[in-house]
Amino acid sequence: MMVLSPAYGRDYANKAAVRADWEADKDFIVASYSIWTGKPVNRAQLVEASAWASKAMPEQPQRVSIRYARLRRTLVIDIIQL
């Protein structure tokens, strides 16, 4: 599961605000340890990447974990291919 945090100094007080910006394709920063750590990414980019990944690992659910509220809370969102 990829861990993301808000980009460009944004933060959220509740899950609804996180989900609204996620659905609006706002950027989030990759916080999990990988070659993409520190890079911005949005929902549309991850949906495209998830479509490719589901072919390679069809049994693996595609999800992201978004940290918010000064990184103290977490919201897990399933990536749905459009």
Image (spheres, rainbow, N blue to C red):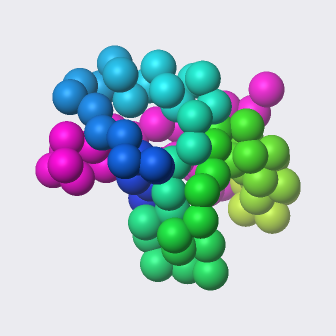
The answer to whether residue 13 is magenta is: no
18 sits to left or right of 24: left
Dividing the picture into quadrants, the one containing residue 12 is top left
Residue 66 visible to the viewer: no
For the C terminus, the quadrant is top right
- Compared with 68, 54 (above or below) is below
Farthest-out residue, front: 9
Dividing the picture into quadrants, the one containing residue 26 is top right
Residue drawn at 46 percent across, 36 percent down: 77
In terms of depth relative to the viewer, which is nearer, 40 or 43? Answer: 40
Residue 56 visible to the viewer: yes
The answer to whether residue 63 is magenta is: yes
In terms of depth relative to the viewer, which is nearer, 17 or 65? Answer: 17
Farthest-out residue, left: 72
- Compared with 44, 58 (above or below) is below
Residue drawn at 30 percent across, 39 percent down: 11
Please state the horizontal and vertical placement of residue 38, each as a whole percent of the image.
52, 70
The magenta segment is: 59-82
- Compared with 10, 14 (above or below) is above
- Compared with 7, 10 (above or below) is above
Please state the horizontal and vertical placement of residue 73, each as a whole percent of the image.
19, 44
Residue drawn at 44 percent across, 70 percent down: 32
Residue drawn at 59 percent across, 65 percent down: 39
